[in-house]
Image (tube, rainbow, N blue to C red):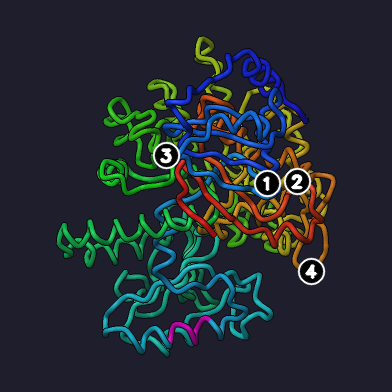
Amino acid sequence: MRTPWIRAFAAAAALLPATRITAQQPADLVLRGGKIVTVDDALGTVQALAARDGRIVAVGTNNEIQAHVGASTRVIELGGRLAIPGFIEGHGHFSGIGEAKQRLDLMQVSSWDEVVSMVEKAVANAKPGEWIRGRGWHQEKWTNTPERNVEGFPIHDSLSAVSPDNPVVLTHASGHASFVNAKAMELAGISKSTKDPTGGEILRDEKGNPTGVLRERASGLISRARSGRRVRRSPEKVEAAFLKTIRLADQACMEAGVTSFQDAGSSFGIVDALKKIIDRGELDVRLWMMIRENNASLARNLPKYKTIGYGNDHLTVRAVKRSIDGALGPRGAWLLEPYADLPSSSGLETASVESVTETARLAMQHGWQACIHAIGDRANREVLDIFEKQFRANPDKKDLRWRIEHAQHIHPDDIPRFGKLGVIASMQGVHCTSDAVYVLARLGEERAKSGAYVWQSLMKTGALVTNGTDAPVEGISPIESYYSTVTRRLADGRTFYPEQRMSRMDALRSYTIWCAKAAFEEDIKGTLTPGKLADIVILSKDILTCPDEEILETAIDFTIVGGAVKYEG
């Protein structure tokens, strides 16, 4: 579906005067001999492109662009390969990517026994008392259910047996639950008598004893236990550790062809630290950030932290982030009706409606975007209600581009509200195929078909639907998420409600210009239009035309940011 704002943007681009370069001003970079899909309707597909001083200065035929080649110009011969605007990660956790690379990677484990074995090996190489951390396990993706379990989740006994002196915390793939051993619970003061925190749950066995699973905000009990160790580090060690984390995340983005990254929730302190890194020229990816802090902190700091295009367009801070519910996998998503596979629960309200309403009010007051995590149909309805009340109370404020992050499970009555209200559905294609193995069990057939990952239904309302991976919840690969978006095909070959698939071109838009639009950055990103940033990705295969099965074989050959090659495969 072609939305009106895209047609208007293309028409405006067509009126821009052609950019010319004299012989004394050769381009820094020229791409030629390929299929360059500009994602600009007025320009279409071209053979060649020239960039200078970080911007695209011309696109056209090989002969037309030859005039821009000088002695110092780097020329990349595409040899028929596909070049597209740099991928924009529409929702991820930037520092989380770097942190995940320094922990046990549990994304591919196939059983609880394998998790225990990995922890046992880590303990053998750790000092007594050292925390063992990991991320990526998902009980619904194991080949078998642990013999001793509660709701399909294992009980900590076997894990605690191999790690008696080392506290262990293993984050669920979704990031919305944790598994801990006895030592970690001891340090956190978690026992049979510990009450569930607001917006969280300590999963217990039939005798009321903690199993080791901490849902949603209950994971904060462990975070507080670890904070004492962190504060004992010197400022120099803290800074060095943060820089290592950022470098790992930045490298992962370049390798994946991600030239811009929309970070879904960091602190004001992280913004300050990133500015120092950017000032030293040590960050390649462009960041657009949502601030995730409490309302009191937002009230104090929003007036002074709004940042647009800092460091040659490497940092923009203009949005706030809250989560009103959890994730479907650990049964933390807030539903209108109980879970089909757990009738005693409808999920969790992880932040009160009143608190999120105040966040929205502050965003409106200070001219910031509001980005609210909502996965369950109850959560989505509550957020739409909050947004609608703010819009009605401020009729003079237009083009707000407020977002619901994930928007995974929506009641059919609420789908038209996205288009009507102009609310952006910030979604992740890969979540559909990753989660599909248990969506039917959680929601049942009727709710799954009518409201789960309904990209086409949302687009038909006029809503903007963006793409991403939620990394490190999923791998950062745009290629994998693109594949999921255009096929909705599971690993076993089944297809999850294929009528909701996007076309190849719309899927590309959802990863480029639509993400740029969702961030107020369509004037500088998202298409290969002269005057825009020269952020480009060159692929080994043509993902717009190749057979479905070849999409996942596509490699990132070049990642170019500001006309400079930052990664070459």
* Residue 82 tag number: 1
Would you say the residues marked 3 and 1 are in contact, meaning their CB atoms lie under 8 Å apart? no
Q: Earlier in the sequence, mark 4 or mark 1?
A: 1
Q: Which residue is mark 3?
A: 289
Q: Residues within 10 Å of mark 1 (few under 14, many from 20)?
A: many
Instruction: Look at label 4 and name its amino acid.
Output: Asp
Quarter of the N terminus within the rendering: top right
Q: Earlier in the sequence, mark 3 or mark 2?
A: 3
Give the distance between the C-alpha atoms of the residues marked 3 and 4, in whole angstroms.
36 Å
Which residue does the image show at 58% across and 36% down from the upper left? 515
Q: Earlier in the sequence, mark 2 or mark 1?
A: 1
- Image coordinates of residue 29 in percent, x first then y, are 50, 39
Q: Which residue is mark 4?
A: 492
Query: Is 566 displayed left or right of 145 in the figure?
Result: left
Would you say the residues marked 2 and 1 are in contact, meaning their CB atoms lie under 8 Å apart? yes
Image quadrant in which you'd find residue 65: top right
For mark 4, give the secondary structure.
Answer: loop
Q: Nearer the viewer, mark 2 or mark 1?
A: 1
Residue 186 vs 6, above or below: the answer is below
Q: Earlier in the sequence, mark 2 or mark 4?
A: 4
Residue 428 vs 313, above or below: the answer is below
Instruction: Look at label 1 and name its amino acid.
Output: Leu
271 vs 302, nearest the viewer: 271
Instruction: Look at label 3 and name its amino acid.
Output: Met
356 vs 139, nearest the viewer: 139
